[in-house]
Image (cartoon, rainbow, N blue to C red):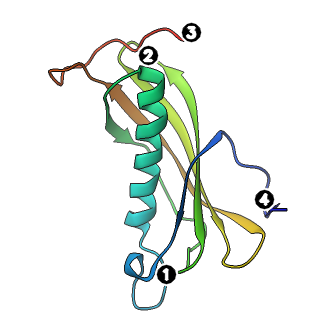
Amino acid sequence: MVHYAEGQPIGDLTLRTLAMPSDANAAGDIFGGWVMAQMDLACGIRAAERAKGRVVTAAVKEMSFAKAMKIGDTLCIYTHVERVGRTSMTLKVEAWAQRYLSDLMEKVTHADFVMVALDGEGKPKAVPAEG
């Protein structure tokens, strides 16, 4: 059973991946850019499902790292569609680390990602209504 250090994640588990040595600096800390890239991948998955098609990242709102990730930790990305506009949507994203060989989960960072739905020609298109 997983033990969450500070509250529970918000949203749905969208992506899980293992932090490997190639994702780290010489001290064994995982690059923040790698964590951010995984968050972007998760947003792309969730937003494309909601838009029923192609999406791109338009903006990432403020992000700061509360905890470090280490080699061997499992990165768990949770996403929640917070707001849907005409062609864009804002997703709340949280990155949690399940510590290596442990049931401890700690929040690493969080951010708001703004995703835009695109048509076949790469132009913004309306996000369809749910249902």
Q: Which mark is residue 6?
A: 4
For marks 4 and 3 on the same chain, the one whose residue lies earlier in the sequence: 4
Left/right placement of residue 43 relative to residue 82 reads left
Question: Would you identify the image quadrant in which residue 99 lies?
Answer: bottom right
The residue tagged 2 is: 85
Whole-number angstrom distance, CA of label 4 to CA of label 3: 34 Å
Residue indicated by mark 1:
29
32, above or below 128, in the image? below
Q: Amino acid at mark 2?
A: Gly
Check contact, mark 2 vs mark 4: CB within 8 A. Answer: no
In the rendered image, the residue lying farthest to the bottom is: 26
Q: In percent of the image, x 80 and y 53: which residue is there? A: 7
Give the image location of residue 107, x and y in percent: 66, 60
Query: Which mark identifies residue 131?
Result: 3
Residue at image location 42% in from the left, 80% down from the top: 24
Report how far apart the C-alphas of labels 2 and 4 lie in the structure: 31 Å
Q: CA distance from mark 1 to mark 3?
A: 43 Å
